[in-house]
Image (tube, rainbow, N blue to C red):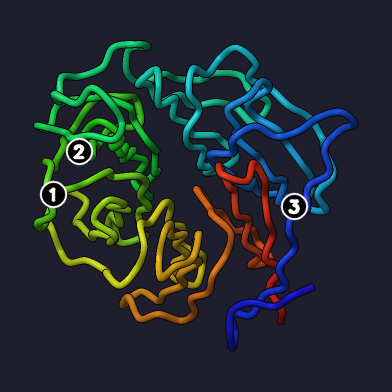
Amino acid sequence: MPQVGSGRYTYEFVQDYLRLPPGESFGRITSVATDSQDRLYVLQRKNPPVMVFDRAGDFLSSWGSGTFMGPHAMNIYNDIAYTTDRDDSVAVIYTLDGRPLQIIGERGVHSDTGCEKRTGPVLRAAGPFNNVTAIALSPSGDLYITDGDRNARVHRYSRDGKLLAAWGEPGSGPGQFRVPHAAVVAPDGKVYVCDRGNKRVQIFTADGKYLGEWTGMGGPGNIVRDADGVYYICEQGSDGHEGQVNIRDESGAVLARFATRQVHWLCTDTHGDIYLGSAKHCSVDKLVRKR
C-alpha cells in the first residue's frame, strides 16, 4: 500500500476499504464519524442515509431511510450522533441506532439571507437556519452550529436547544464567512471554524470574539482535534490536488500535509487512523497510521 505523510504522521493509504453488502453501492458521501468502539458511520445522499461498519471495514447495519432531505454532516460525541439536514435546514440529534432525540430548527423553513442557491451570493446574515452545515459539541455542553451553505453565521445553542448567541456576516474580513462549513471546540472553549470559501480556519472565543486564523490551505471541509491537541483538516481544491489533509498543532504550525482524492469530510479513531469521505468519488478511503 502506498504511504503518505511524514515523520510521526506517516500513513498507509487504503482506497475504498469498506465492504458493502452484495448489490449495494454508495451514493454521494457527505460525512464520516466514529464512535467509542471505532465503528464507522457513513452519511450518504441515498437511502439508507446512514451505513455502519466495524473497524475492519465490514458492514454492520444501516438506518435513517426517509428521514433526511439532504444529509450533510454527522459528528459523534459521547456515542450520540449530531447531524445536519442541509436541505431541510434542521439539526437533528440521534442515538447511534437512529432514534431521534432532538430537533433544532423547523423543517423546510429557511431564514432570509437573500441567497437563492448554494453557489451564492449570500447578501446578508440571518437567523437559524438556511442550509445548515454542521454541529460541534463544546466541553460545556453548548452546541455550535455552522449555518453556511446559504448563510454566513455560527449559532451557539444551549444543550436543551435554546439559542444563546450568533455571529458572522458575509465577507472575507475577521469574523466574516464564506461558507462556514464545520467547527470544533477545544477543551479551553476556543471555537475553530472552517471558513471554506475563504480558505482558512478562524478561531474565536466561546462567545464569538475573533482571536486569529490559520491560512495557507485549500477550502477546509472539516476539522477534528485528537486527545493530544492535534488538529486534522481536510481541504478541497488546493495546489492542483483534488484534496489534501492538513495536520497542525495547537499553535497552527503544520505537522504534515499531503495530497488525497477529493474529500468532503474526515474523522479519526482511537488508533490515530483517518477516514476520508468523498462526495465526488462516492467512497471512503482510510489512512492507517504507522507507529
Cα distance in 3D space between marks 2 and 1 = 8 Å
Q: Label 1 neighbourhood size at 10 Å, few (<14), some (14-19), many (20+)? A: many
On the image, which quarter does residue 187 sit in?
bottom left
Q: Is residue 135 left or right of residue 285?
A: left
Q: Which residue is mark 3?
A: 16
Q: Is residue 80 above or below residue 274?
A: above
Q: Which residue is mark 2?
A: 153
Q: Amino acid at mark 2?
A: Arg
In the rendered image, residue 101, in percent from the top left (x then y), is placed at: 51, 20
Q: Label 3 neighbourhood size at 10 Å, few (<14), some (14-19), many (20+)? A: some
Q: Which residue is mark 1?
A: 176
Q: Nearer the viewer, residue 23 or 94?
A: 23
In the rendered image, residue 281, in percent from the top left (x then y), is placed at: 62, 46
Q: Say which quadrant the C terminus sits in.
A: bottom right
Number of numbered tags placed on the structure image: 3
Instruction: State the SS at label 3.
Output: loop
Nearer-N-terminus badge (2/3):
3
